[in-house]
Amino acid sequence: QDKIENKSQLVNENLKKCLNTKDGRLAASLISDFLQFFHLDFTLAVFQPEINTLNGFDSHDALSRDLGMSDAEGNRNNPLLLELIRCSRNKDKPMPLF
Amino acid sequence: QDKIENKSQLVNENLKKCLNTKDGRLAASLISDFLQFFHLDFTLAVFQPEINTLNGFDSHDALSRDLGMSDAEGNRNNPLLLELIRCSRNKDKPMPLF
């Protein structure tokens, strides 16, 4: 029993450290954005208490700004995680004008 | 009741379409990789049946390859979602040699 509790604390410690960084917070918010977009309500209902973030998640718009994505990329109609994957795939190609 | 069922079908339809694309599968696998890394077992236990993917998720190594990340980036010690965010943040900077 003690062993399990120690492991659980250690795990939470890593997660807490991660969520205290800007990138960690972004990652959790991207997951939340994806879950919300597809109305994965059961997963969301477990995810939020399990990562136990006090400050909630960043909004879609704040996330979009932080990731340097413009509205022109049509990111309102897609989860930002998908946009991020698309951008990273195209990072070696020149940006299209439109 | 019918209305709720229709909405649920529509939602699942969007998700199904998304998961049938390479990027959609990558996104779901990145989320699964993050949840596994931090041992968010309760969320994982709901996420997997809720997105109802028949083929499971891509492994950490397969994901890493698909995203064009090298082992040198130390991505074994971090969830790939965090690495992806870091890479996208640095995409305008020249890659370091080491």
Image (spheres, coloured by chain):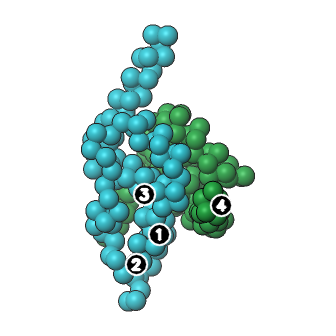
Chain colours: A cyan, B green
How much space separates mark 2 and mark 4, taking CA atoms?
A: 35 Å
Could you tell me which residue is drawn at 42 percent across and 28 percent down? Answer: A11
Q: Is residue B74 above or below residue B84?
A: above
Where on the picture, by quarter, is residue B85?
bottom left
Q: Is residue A14 above or below residue B97?
A: above
Q: Secondary structure at mark 3?
A: helix
Name the amino acid type tagged 3: Asp
Marks 4, 1 in one chain:
no
Q: Position of residue B80 (x, y in %)?
A: 47, 50
Mark carried by residue A73: 2
Q: Which residue is mark 3?
A: A33
Residues under labels 3 and 2: Cα distance?
Answer: 17 Å
- Gap in Å between the C-alphas at discs 1 and 2? 10 Å
Q: Label 3 vs label 1: CA separation?
A: 9 Å
Q: Closest to the observer: A48 or A64?
A: A48
Relative to A73, B9 lies left or right: right
Residue B25 can be seen, yes or no: no
Image vertical order of residue B37 relative to residue B22, above or below: above
In this rendering, the answer to whether A6 lies above or below B80 is above
Residue A26 percent location from the top left of the image? 34, 53
Residue flagged by tag 1: what amino acid is it? Asn
How many angstroms separate mark 4 from mark 3 (CA)?
A: 27 Å
Which residue was labeled with disc 4? B2
**Amino acid bearing label 4:** Asp
Regarding mark 4 in the picture, which secondary structure is present there? helix
Disc 3 residue crowd, few under 14, some 14–19, many 20+, Cα 10 Å:
many
Q: Where residue B46 appears, x then y in whole percent?
A: 58, 41
Marker disc for residue A78: 1
